[in-house]
Amino acid sequence: MKKLLTIALLLTSLTSASAQFKDKVSSLFIKKEAFTIDDQNELKYMEADLSKVVFYTSQEVSLKRLVSTDSTVKENAVGDIIFENGDVIDRLVIKKGATGFIHQISEDTLQVKFENIEGRYLTFVSDKRNMDTQTKYYLFVDENRRVVYNNQEWDLLLGNNVCIQWKSKSVNVNKESSHTVKGLRADGSQKKTFKESILGK
């Protein structure tokens, strides 16, 4: 009996592991697409947990900022320290397809974190550009081509048209409800289910 129970538990464990592996593999082949304002509204309506949605950068983001030669500043550098024309530069690259999660969200703005360190997030704003038919979320760049990251201003070298992407088919946003009907009585009144009787409906 114990052997049968052990075998049953082993099979259950293998089935669960196989299902998880299958989900991970299938997720790799799900196409990324731009996250739109309509997607955000739909997720809110479906009461999806946005904090668990994985987001991706559509292109590489390359940033740089001039830093002091002070050793303390260099030790606190966010990216790689390089020397350029006699200046000390902090250089940061966020790769295409880098994964991030929501830091803060509003109707027109997404703040997406790519590192588990306070302040290290990028801000994306809703916008329509070029041939867009839907409103997407693009990297916020000011008129001087600067981006805020780690509570510091950076010069943007690459990534002016980066938008946030996601794998919509990998997110379960189905909000299902069911209503059980027991039919009518002979006098035309509605029969109640056990749950309705308990709740007094």
Image: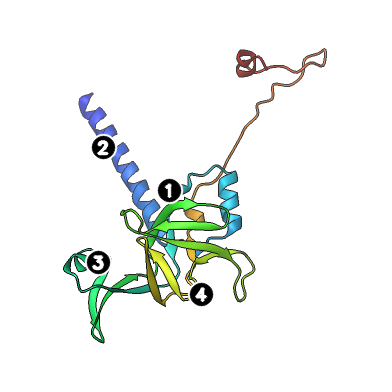
Disc 2 versus disc 4: distance between alpha carbons?
61 Å
Per the image, the residue denoted by label 2 is: 10
**For the C terminus, which image quadrant?**
top right
Residue 114: numbered disc: none
Per the image, the residue denoted by label 1 is: 52
Disc 3 versus disc 2: distance between alpha carbons?
49 Å
Three-letter amino acid code at the position of disc 4: Glu
User: Residue at image x 54%, y 46%?
Assistant: 173
Per the image, the residue denoted by label 4 is: 143
Which quadrant of the view contains residue 80? bottom left
Front tag of 1 and 2: 1
Disc 1 versus disc 4: distance between alpha carbons?
33 Å
Position of 5 relative to 10 (above/below):
above
Give the farthest residue toward the left: 71
Three-letter amino acid code at the position of disc 3: Ala
Relative horizontal placement of residue 115, taking residue 3 as reference (left or right) = right
Three-letter amino acid code at the position of disc 2: Leu
**Disc 3 to disc 2: CB gap under 8 Å:** no
Front tag of 1 and 4: 4
Per the image, the residue denoted by label 3 is: 77
The one of 59 and 113 positioned closer to us in this rendering:
113
Residue 24: give x, y in percent of width and height.
37, 54
Residue 146: give x, y in percent of width and height.
43, 72
